[in-house]
Image (cartoon, rainbow, N blue to C red):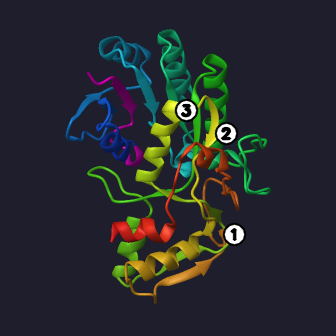
């Protein structure tokens, strides 16, 4: 008899990859709102998570043994321009989910972000003070604090930049990169923005590990710190893309609604010690070719 796992945001990029992996060991129920998607062996349900009655009803109907909450409004520029709507999704829904998991005494995993940091003192450990520079980062901090206050057993997983195969309803940042270069257009990438990326499959493995072994905050970054531009160069090499369009630029050259931190590289040694094993970026990308 498999236990029931509820995955919010199952139609999203990370949620979809997570459902694929989790279905090997769990009876998985996934929620979506606007992007209807069928995933083999997953029971998908349309739920407006910001409607507390709908959210509570799903908990009552499914009675999950555990919850992984990936649903979010995760575009920093959108959050910057739509603060109230994104607050309802990113903060209030998360706190309500922590309450419902606390009531049922079941494991709860939350996907936060490396953007809770200001990028001035990397690499960041779990114990380092947060200092977000944009609204999305602020909302994730509020969600982290609110969830842990309501339910200290929550595993708060700070996620890095993620990439991977496109899903039926979502892409990662590499798909538009590849398309732009294949079409012979110019692709400008930051020389001065650093992250510790992982593939969505690796990230999903990390979340399932956290479900078993973590309470409190954990970082699920990759092994390597890399700039957006150097990531692009690696992509060009492995996918054998035209190199002419790839150009370096700096953050200050691009006007964006949401400010961006310079270097939010994560120190994930705590997760590595628990058995989290991201491959090298080269190995991850070679799997995608």
Helix, strand or loop for disc 1: helix
Q: CA distance from mark 3 to mark 1?
A: 41 Å
Depth-wise, is mark 1 or mark 2 nearer the camera?
2
Task: Give percent across and percent down for residue 121.
Answer: 79, 56
Q: Is residue 270 above or below residue 28?
A: below
Q: CA distance from mark 1 to mark 2?
A: 22 Å
Question: Residue at position x 40%, y 14% from top?
Answer: 56
State which tag comes first along the sequence, 1 or 2.
Answer: 2
- Residue occupied by mark 3: 213
Depth-wise, is mark 3 or mark 1 nearer the camera?
3
- Residue occupied by mark 1: 252
Question: Residue at position x 31%, y 38% from top?
Answer: 34
Q: What's drawn in magenta, residue-wise?
A: 1-14
Q: Is residue 202 magenta?
A: no
Helix, strand or loop for disc 3: helix
Quadrant of the drawing holding the N terminus: top left
In the foreground, 28 or 31: 28
State which tag comes first along the sequence, 3 or 1.
Answer: 3
Left or right: residue 84 versus residue 241 is: right
In the foreground, 287 or 137: 287
State which tag comes first along the sequence, 3 or 2.
Answer: 2
Label 1 crowd (10 A; few <14 / some 14-19 / many >=20): few
């Amino acid at each position: 008899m498999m236990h029931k796992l509820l995955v919010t945001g199952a139609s999203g990029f990370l949620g979809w990859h997570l459902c694929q992996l989790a279905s090997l060991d769990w009876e998985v129920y996934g929620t979506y709102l606007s992007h209807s998607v069928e995933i083999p062996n997953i029971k998908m349900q349309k739920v407006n998570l910001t409607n507390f009655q709908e959210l509570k009803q799903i908990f009552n109907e499914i009675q999950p043994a555990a919850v992984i909450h990936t649903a979010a409004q995760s575009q920093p520029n959108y959050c910057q321009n739509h603060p109230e709507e994104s607050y309802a999704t990113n903060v209030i829904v998360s706190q309500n989910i922590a309450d419902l998991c606390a009531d049922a005494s079941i494991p709860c995993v939350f996907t936060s972000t490396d953007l809770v940091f200001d990028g001035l003192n990397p690499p960041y450990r779990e114990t380092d003070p947060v200092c977000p520079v944009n609204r999305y980062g602020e909302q994730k901090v509020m969600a982290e604090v609110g969830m842990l206050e309501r339910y200290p057993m929550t595993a708060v997983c700070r996620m890095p930049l993620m990439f991977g195969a496109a899903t039926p309803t979502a892409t990662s940042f590499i798909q538009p990169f590849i398309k732009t270069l294949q079409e012979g257009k110019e692709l400008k990438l930051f020389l001065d923005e650093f992250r510790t990326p992982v593939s969505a499959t690796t990230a999903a493995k990390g979340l399932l590990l956290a479900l078993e072994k973590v309470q409190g905050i954990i970082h699920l970054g990759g092994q390597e710190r890399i700039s957006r531009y150097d990531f692009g160069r690696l992509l060009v090499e492995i996918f054998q893309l035209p190199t002419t369009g790839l150009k370096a630029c700096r953050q200050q050259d691009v006007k964006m609604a949401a400010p961006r931190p310079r270097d939010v590289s994560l120190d994930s040694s705590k997760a590595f010690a628990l058995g989290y094993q991201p491959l090298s970026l080269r190995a991850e990308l070679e799997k995608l070719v």
